Image: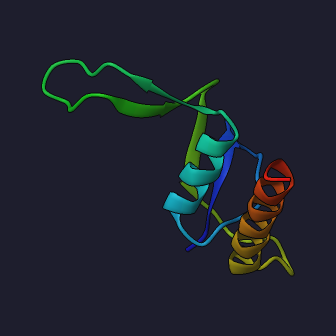
Amino acid sequence: MPYALFCDDAKLSKSYPTEADVWKLATESGLVTDVEAKNSKPTPRRVLDNDYEIRPCQAEPGECPEKNERDAQAEKDFQLALKGR
């Protein structure tokens, strides 16, 4: 089942194959912060800003979560190549 970034009930991102893919993109977009843990939870732990959450979802008609992930990786590689010039 694909996953996406949500705020309340609004889907804010494309669908991606795994929850880890969405966490990675959220981190790269600056939407994830590390906070100190409370009680017995390990430190630090990741949380999403602004009441965002990552949830399972249905892909939109015609949408391919695997292609979205490949496109996101290609865009990241392209941006890194531009910075290396």
- The answer to which of 70 and 38 lies nearer the viewer is 70
Residue with the most extreme front position: 85
- The answer to which of 60 and 49 lies nearer the viewer is 49
Residue with the most extreme left position: 40
Residue name at image x 71 percent, y 66 percent:
73
Count all numbered tags in the image, as a single digit: 0
- The answer to which of 78 and 24 lies nearer the viewer is 78
Q: Is residue 21 above or below residue 48?
A: below
Q: How is the image coloured?
A: rainbow
Residue 76: quadrant of the picture: bottom right
- Across and down, in percent, residue 2 comes to 60, 70
Residue name at image x 43 percent, y 34 percent:
46
Residue 17: quadrant of the picture: bottom right
- Across and down, in percent, residue 49 comes to 60, 26
Q: Is residue 78 above or below residue 13?
A: below
| Left or right of residue 42: residue 77 | right
Q: Is residue 77 above or below residue 12?
A: below
- Across and down, in percent, residue 23 comes to 55, 50
Residue name at image x 47 percent, y 31 percent:
47
| Left or right of residue 36: residue 25 | right
- Viewport quadrant of the N terminus: bottom right
Residue name at image x 20 percent, y 30 percent:
41
